[in-house]
Image: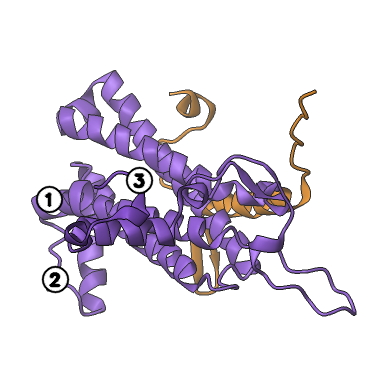
């Protein structure tokens, strides 16, 4: 409901075409997000455990 | 079992299959390795959390799927609470594959099959493939025009690769059985085996730093440890 209010979903999906390659914009966004999360997971420091006295 | 621990097993008990299984299970995976309270220090990285994130998503998938299965298609299509649980099921699947793919990338670039972890890698890869089938049969089980469209397209796809005679993707009963029983059982069994293998061989370490000295063994036994919980 919220996403439907933010984005108009009442139309066919948008697609990217590049020669034989074809993929929906939604899938491209998910793949880019996965790549971003993968890079952040390598670069971001992991929180250290607090040492109890 | 006799008093005094596993060393005092009588000859009669030695013949029992339960004794044989128990002794080999404990020898293969002792309790301190099955449920460890410390992990190697290199596990304190975000890239190591995506395996357990995949498991967490799978738990949500199974619970929401059980609720959907009990209430039925009319409930999940028509009622507000049904559509809510339908959405929970869909988005937990999205998170499941999202986390599993990042986990796969992390393990691939870490060459997680090193140090005798080949079976761990293979069980993970096969789990991924079976999970794709589980997701596909889930799309076929929606009971709407979307599932009919996917079934007709999937039928042609399966026929084109020569396996169309084994599956009738336009048969809702067959696909629903695959989706709610057969494939989930296989996914969970493979995942349990995968986790037990991780417990047995330890979490794969990162590549050693480039140095002129000879590289250390990838075995986690010699690695420094810290309290970290048990993320596989």
Instruction: Pick whichever of labels 1 and 2 is earlier in the sequence.
Output: 2
User: In the rendered image of this protein, which colour is used for chain A?
Assistant: orange
Residue at (24% x, 21% y) in the render: B79
Q: Which mark is residue B4?
A: 3
Q: Which mark is residue B15?
A: none
Q: B179 and B172: which one is in front? A: B179
Which residue is denoted by mark 1 in the rendering?
A: B172
Q: Dot 2: few (<14), some (14–19), or many (≥20) neighbours within 10 Å?
A: few
Residue B95: percent from left, percent from top:
48, 43
- The residue lying furthest to the top in this view is B80
In the image, which is nearer the foreground, mark 3 or mark 1?
3
Residue B14 occupies quadrant:
bottom left
Residue at (20% x, 57% y) in the render: B13
In the image, which is nearer the foreground, mark 1 or mark 2?
2
User: In the rendered image of this protein, which colour is used for chain B?
Assistant: purple
Residue B155: percent from left, percent from top:
20, 66
| Disc 1 secondary structure class | helix
Q: Chain of mark 3?
A: B
Q: B227 and B51: which one is in front? A: B227
To the question of a shared chain for discs 3 and 2, the answer is yes
To the question of a shared chain for discs 1 and 2, the answer is yes
Q: B223 and A48: which one is in front? A: B223
* B183 lies above or below A17: above
Residue B203 occupies quadrant:
bottom right
Instruction: Pick whichever of labels 3 and 1 is earlier in the sequence.
Output: 3
In the image, which is nearer the foreground, mark 3 or mark 2?
3
Side of B115 relative to B155 (left or right):
right
Q: Dot 3: few (<14), some (14–19), or many (≥20) neighbours within 10 Å?
A: few
Which residue is denoted by mark 2 in the rendering?
A: B166
Side of B133 relative to B174 (left or right):
right
Residue at (53% x, 64% y) in the render: A17
């Amino acid at each position: 409901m919220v996403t439907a209010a933010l984005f108009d979903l009442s139309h066919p999906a948008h697609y990217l075409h590049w020669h034989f390659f074809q993929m929906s914009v939604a899938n491209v966004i998910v793949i880019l997000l996965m790549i971003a999360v993968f890079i952040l997971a390598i670069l971001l420091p992991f929180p250290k455990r607090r040492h109890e006295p | 079992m006799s008093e005094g621990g596993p060393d005092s097993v009588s000859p009669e008990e030695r013949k029992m299959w339960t004794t044989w299984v128990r002794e080999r299970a404990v020898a293969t995976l002792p309790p301190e390795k099955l449920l460890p309270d410390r992990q190697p220090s290199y596990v304190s990285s975000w890239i190591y959390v995506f395996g357990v994130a995949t498991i967490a998503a799978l738990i949500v998938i199974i619970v929401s799927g059980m609720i959907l299965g009990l209430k039925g298609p009319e409930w999940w299509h028509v009622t507000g609470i049904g559509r809510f649980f339908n959405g929970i099921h869909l988005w937990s699947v999205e998170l499941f594959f999202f986390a599993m793919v990042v986990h796969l990338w992390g393990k691939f670039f870490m060459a997680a099959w090193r140090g005798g972890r080949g079976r761990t890698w293979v069980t993970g890869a096969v789990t991924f493939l079976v999970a794709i089938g589980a997701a596909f049969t889930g799309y076929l089980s929606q009971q709407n025009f979307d599932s009919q469209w996917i079934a007709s397209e999937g039928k042609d796809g399966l026929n084109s690769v020569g396996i169309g005679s084994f599956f009738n993707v336009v048969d809702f009963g067959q696909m629903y059985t695959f989706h709610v029983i057969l494939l989930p059982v296989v996914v969970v069994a493979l995942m349990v085996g995968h986790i037990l293998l991780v417990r047995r061989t330890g979490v794969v370490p990162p590549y050693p730093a480039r140095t002129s000295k000879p590289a250390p063994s990838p075995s986690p036994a010699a690695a420094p440890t810290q309290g970290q919980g048990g993320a596989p």
